[in-house]
Image (cartoon, helix red, strand yellow):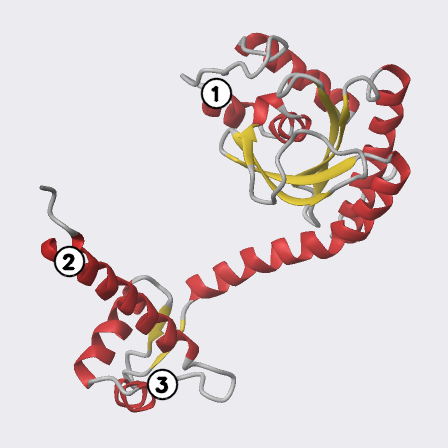
């Protein structure tokens, strides 16, 4: 008979780990605008910890750069790593705030589902989505991942990478087919990405799912670097030919508006 978690001690170990994380989080939250620096004894007293536990947690957080210790006083303050994490969070909050009203307009103008996605390696992660009344047999939640090469958002994001970075990411990686239309040849994909970069938008004609097509365009941050992509997704019967071209124009326009709301200024022509 297989040993249970209780018999092996697995559950208590997991509880202990979660308790350690919870304690570390409580320590970090003890710092505030009023209390920018705290000592070991103060942290222990405020949180009801032993001095030795408080010291271990503070030292560990300092080793991970989440806290800094003043060598003269021995007191701790919030570290640079926390500010780096905060900057990453504020970037996504800014993207949400900048994109949502534009997505609403884009959905109204196209009548189709709209998405915003970011690139993670060779996958896209969808961080915003607005449904249309035309229901499609596609994913239903934010946070869904897809291979970048089978989506218009992914192609728009891959096309924006420096060529050396792009080639490095593709090195030794198989381009898995999701449908008979999926681009699985690396040379063909690079050519498609070059075309995408030249015209400023990407297309996906039933490459990720039969019966579904999309167009996507890159979103740039204040520094001009592509940080996300916006796309319109629709039934392949509707989203083709002239309708596809029109949707592409609207997507490019939406991407430019979101980019401007993020602080990007297009160069004057």
From what the image shows, is residue 120 above or below residue 215?
Answer: below
Percent of width and height locating residue 252: 82, 33
Circles 2, 1 touching at the beta carbon (< 8 Å)? no
Q: Quadrant of the N terminus?
A: top left
Q: How far is the residue under mark 3 from the one under mark 2?
A: 39 Å
Who is closer to the viewer here, 234 or 256? Answer: 234
Residue 108 visible to an observer of this rendering: yes
Circles 3, 2 touching at the beta carbon (< 8 Å)? no
Q: How many marks?
A: 3
Percent of width and height locating residue 175: 50, 16
Residue visible at 62% across and 21% down in the picture: 208
Residue 20: assigned label: none
Who is closer to the viewer here, 29 or 13? Answer: 13
Q: Report helix, strand or loop for mark 2.
A: helix
Left or right: 237 as drawn, with respect to 180: right
* Disc 1 target residue: 170
* Disc 3 target residue: 38
State which tag comes first along the sequence, 3 or 2: 2
Name, please, the residue furthest toward the front.
1
């Amino acid at each position: 008979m297989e040993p249970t978690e209780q018999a092996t001690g697995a559950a208590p170990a997991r509880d202990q780990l979660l308790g350690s994380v919870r304690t570390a989080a409580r320590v970090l939250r003890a710092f505030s605008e009023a209390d920018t620096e705290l000592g070991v004894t103060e942290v222990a007293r405020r949180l009801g910890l032993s001095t030795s536990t408080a010291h271990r947690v503070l030292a560990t957080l300092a080793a991970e750069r989440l806290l800094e210790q003043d060598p003269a006083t021995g007191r701790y303050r919030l570290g640079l790593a926390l500010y780096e994490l905060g900057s990453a969070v504020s970037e996504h909050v800014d993207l949400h705030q900048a994109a949502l009203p534009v997505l609403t307009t884009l959905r109204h103008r196209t009548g189709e589902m709209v998405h915003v996605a970011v690139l993670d390696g060779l996958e896209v992660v969808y961080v915003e989505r607005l449904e249309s009344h035309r229901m499609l047999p596609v994913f239903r939640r934010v946070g869904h991942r897809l291979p970048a090469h089978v989506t218009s958002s992914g192609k728009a994001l891959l096309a924006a990478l420096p060529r050396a970075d792009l080639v490095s990411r593709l090195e030794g990686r198989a381009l898995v087919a999701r449908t008979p239309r999926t681009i699985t040849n690396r040379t063909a994909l690079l050519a498609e990405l070059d075309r995408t970069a030249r015209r400023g938008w990407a297309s996906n004609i039933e490459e990720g799912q039969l019966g579904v097509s999309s167009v996507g365009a890159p979103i740039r941050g204040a520094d001009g670097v592509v940080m996300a992509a916006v796309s319109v997704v629709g039934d392949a019967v509707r989203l083709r030919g002239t309708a596809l071209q029109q949707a592409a124009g609207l997507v490019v326009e939406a991407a430019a508006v979101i980019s401007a709301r993020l602080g990007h200024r297009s160069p004057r022509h």
